Image (tube, rainbow, N blue to C red):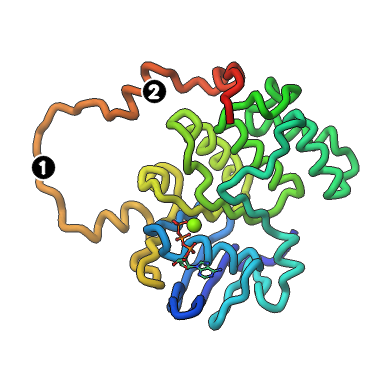
Amino acid sequence: MSTTTGPAIQVRGLRKSFADVDVLRGVDLLVERGSIYALLGANGAGKTTLVRILSTLLPPDAGTATVCDLDVATRAAQVRGSISLTGQFAAVDEVLTGRENLVLMAQLWHLADPGARADELLEQFSLAEAGGRRVVTWSGGMRRRLDIAMSLTGSPPVVFLDEPTTGLDPQGRLEVWGAVRTLAAAGTTVLLTTQYLEEAEKLADRIAILHRGRVLVEGTLAELRALLPPTTVEYVEKQPTLEEIFLALVGDDPSDAGEHAEDGR
Ligand SMILES: Nc1ncnc2c1ncn2[C@@H]1O[C@H](COP(=O)(O)OP(=O)(O)OP(=O)(O)O)[C@@H](O)[C@H]1O
Ligand SMILES: [Mg+2]
């Protein structure tokens, strides 16, 4: 873990092209330590490309990027030791139990007590009850939380989550949001990409909108709201949103999540 005190992530003038497509055309970004930062953008805006550069999987064409004050181009190995990356597709082994998946990962990290670390993570992500069951019997939200837990086995200070809730139902999304908040509360920096505006609204300390290869706007939700002209005040009866109705009927108690039968994936 790095002991320096600069921002968790700093990006300056980052550029990346594929063949004749200029995906990133000068991206600047600053993510403070311990914050949740959301990167929004349409399909193909370059979110995954940016995350792949920051996690050293892809070299930039120009510009600089540092993670924990380490340059991703010249200090790739150290950067990798400071981060975790969770992609959209779960890396969990369905044949194993949740706990076995975590123990395996802790062994790969050569931790002194893999079982203890596995139990700690199961607890942190509210998966302790289901931990002894094979993952094939778990719901999508539980699998995604396990996937995030696995990537955190080595306690990295910076975590990249590329569309952590895509494909999940509202209940599963709430579960993952809870896990992300727990992480940030423990001081971990989280950079997540999302298609769901509500996700950025609910979770993020700061939000950046990536558009046409650049950061179009950046700020807190209040700052972004201030960009639009003030709304006129109208008095209307507040109708519940579909999400509120869904959750009221189906319930949003995370303890229910352990009761799902095999979901056929
Ligand atoms: N390895 C590659 N080779 C060629 N083109 C690529 C490659 N990776 C990404 N691209 C192109 O770069 C652009 C940005 O892709 P990227 O995956 O970063 O977008 P995104 O914002 O993550 O989109 P989505 O919301 O669909 O995940 C797209 O036009 C994509 O086709
Ligand atoms: Mg993507």
The residue labelled by disc 1 is 233
Who is closer to the viewer here, 155 or 39? 39
Pick whichever, 131 or 179, lies toward us. Answer: 131
Which residue occupies the foreground of this view, 6 or 110? 110
Mark 2 crowd level (few <14, some 14–19, many ≥20, 10 Å Cα): some
Using the image, tell me which numbered label, if any, was put on residue 45. Answer: none
From the viewer's perspective, tell me whether residue 191 is left or right of residue 170.
right
Q: From the viewer's perspective, is the residue at label 1 or at label 2 nearer? A: 2
Label 1 CA crowd tier, 10 Å (few <14, some 14–19, many 20+): few
Secondary structure of the residue carrying tag 2 is: helix
Q: Amino acid at mark 2?
A: Leu
Residue beneath the point at 48% across and 69% down: 29
**Residue drawn 44% across the image and 76% down it:** 21
Q: Quadrant of the C terminus?
A: top right
SS class, disc 1 = loop
In which quadrant will I find the N terminus? bottom right
Looking at the image, tell me whether mark 1 or mark 2 is earlier in sequence order. Answer: 1
Task: Give the answer, above or below, for where 181 lies relative to 244.
Answer: below
What separation in Å lies between label 1 and label 2 (alpha carbons)?
A: 29 Å
Quadrant in the rendering for residue 119 = top right
- Looking at the image, is 85 positioned above or below residue 103? below
Q: Which mark is residue 247?
A: 2
Residue at image location 76% in from the left, 68% down from the top: 77
* Image x and y of residue 207, in percent: 41, 56
Residue that extends furthest to the bottom in the rendered view of this protein: 62
Q: How many marks?
A: 2
Q: Is residue 14 visible?
A: no
Residue type, mark 1 in image: Val
